[in-house]
Structures are given as C-alpha cells and as structure tokens.
Amino acid sequence: MKLAIILILAYFLGSIPTGYLFVKNFLGVDIRNYGSGNVGATNVARKLGVKMGALVAFFDIMKGFIPVLLAGQLFGVDEGYLLFLIGIAAIIGHNWSVFLGFDGGKGVATTIGVILGVAPVSFVILGLVWLLVTFTLRIVSVASLLAILTLPVSVYYLTGDQAQAIMGMVLFIFVVFTHRENIKRLIRGEEKKIKPGSQS
C-alpha cells in the first residue's frame, strides 16, 4: 500500500506541465501549437530562448529527482530497482500528464532527474556523453538517445544488480518510444540541429 501511494504521488508530481505553464504564463499561448508541439525544454527554448528552456529543464529534472529523494528519505525505500520504479511513475506523469489530457513531453529531463537520484555515477557518465554528442553533432535527440543508452550498461557495471539494469533498459525504451518521430526524421536526414549562437 505504501509503495502504491508513493507511485501515485510520483505520477502526479511528474504530471505538472512545467513547459506548458511557463509559455502560457509568459506568452499566453499553448506551446503544443508551436515548433515540435512538445511541452519539453527543447521546444520551450525555441519559443522563449535558451535561458527559459534551461529553467524548464531544471524543473523537469526535479520532477524526477524529488520523488526518488523523498521515497528514500521519508519512506525508507532503499532498493535501487524500486527507486527506479518510482522514477518511472514520475516519467509517465511527465510524458502523459493528467493535466494535459494525457499529453506531455518526451521525458528526457525527468529521466535524468531519476538517474541523478538513484545512480549519481551513472548520471555523470550520461551527462558527459550527452554533452560530447550535443557539442559534436548538435542534434539533441541523438545526444539524448545515446546518453540514456549508457544507463543500463553503467548501472550493471557499477552495481552488478540485474534488476536495476533492467529498469535502466526500460527507461531507454521509453526514450526511444517518445523520440520515434525524431528517429524517423534522423533516418530521412531532416532532424534539426542546434544553431550556434541561439538566442538566450
């Protein structure tokens, strides 16, 4: 029963539509009607600038980090695979928010928050891969996919825990699913790159 309550709370916290609320507050418009139609930080950055996109990314990261942190600190959950499961509930909330009619983002930032809370060393590895790929290829979707792919490998290498590695693979599959349109554009050679000197 305790775990079920935590999972529900994690889902609702993840459901808070940060990007939607920011754009609605500053511009009075629905971010889903612009750019990629996504409520995540990348699309917000295209509409409000890099600084605002980074702020949205921070809050989206916290949506994954806080449920994991509280589950450990307040409810005594210390099994890694259960913490990942709680994080997955928050990611589901972000991707399919009850406040947006089960619409949402792609879950990368929230996934990063979960990893930061459960496996901080894997978070560092993932972050370095993301930065390297982003600054080399300037394609955020490729950087996100490759970075998250390192998770099940690094978690298993560091902990030897097969259950955590499986959870890491589930997170990767989530990211692949939410990036399926990006993958199609990559195959067609149409995926957009980050422009150097984008507005801030």
Image (spheres, grey):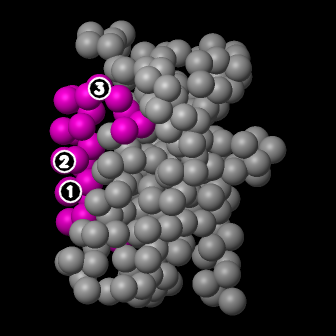
Three-letter residue code for mark 1: Val
Residue 194 visible? The answer is: yes
User: In this rendering, is residue 168 above or below 47?
Assistant: below
Q: CA distance from mark 3 to mark 1?
A: 20 Å
User: In this rendering, is residue 143 above or below 21?
Assistant: below
Does the magenta-highlighted stretch encompass residue 161?
A: no
User: In this rendering, is residue 134 above or below 98?
Assistant: above
Q: Which mark is residue 85?
A: none
Question: Which residue position holds label 2?
Answer: 128
Q: Position of residue 96 (x, y in %)?
A: 69, 51
Quadrant the C terminus occupies? top left
Residue 23 visible? The answer is: no
Q: Is residue 126 left or right of residue 25?
A: left
- Residue count near mark 2 (Cα–Cα under 10 Å), binned few <14, some 14–19, many ≥20: few
Magenta residues, as a range? 116-142
Do the CB atoms of the residues marked 1 and 2 lie less than 8 Å apart? yes
Q: Residue at x 44, y 77 (%)?
A: 166
Q: Which mark is residue 138?
A: 3
Q: Nearer the viewer, mark 3 or mark 1?
A: 3
Q: Position of residue 195 (x, y in %)?
A: 32, 13
Disc 3, SS? loop
Q: Position of residue 8 (x, y in %)?
A: 68, 70
Q: For residue 138, which quarter of the picture?
A: top left
- Residue count near mark 3 (Cα–Cα under 10 Å), binned few <14, some 14–19, many ≥20: some
Question: Which residue position holds label 1?
Answer: 124
- Residue count near mark 1 (Cα–Cα under 10 Å), binned few <14, some 14–19, many ≥20: few
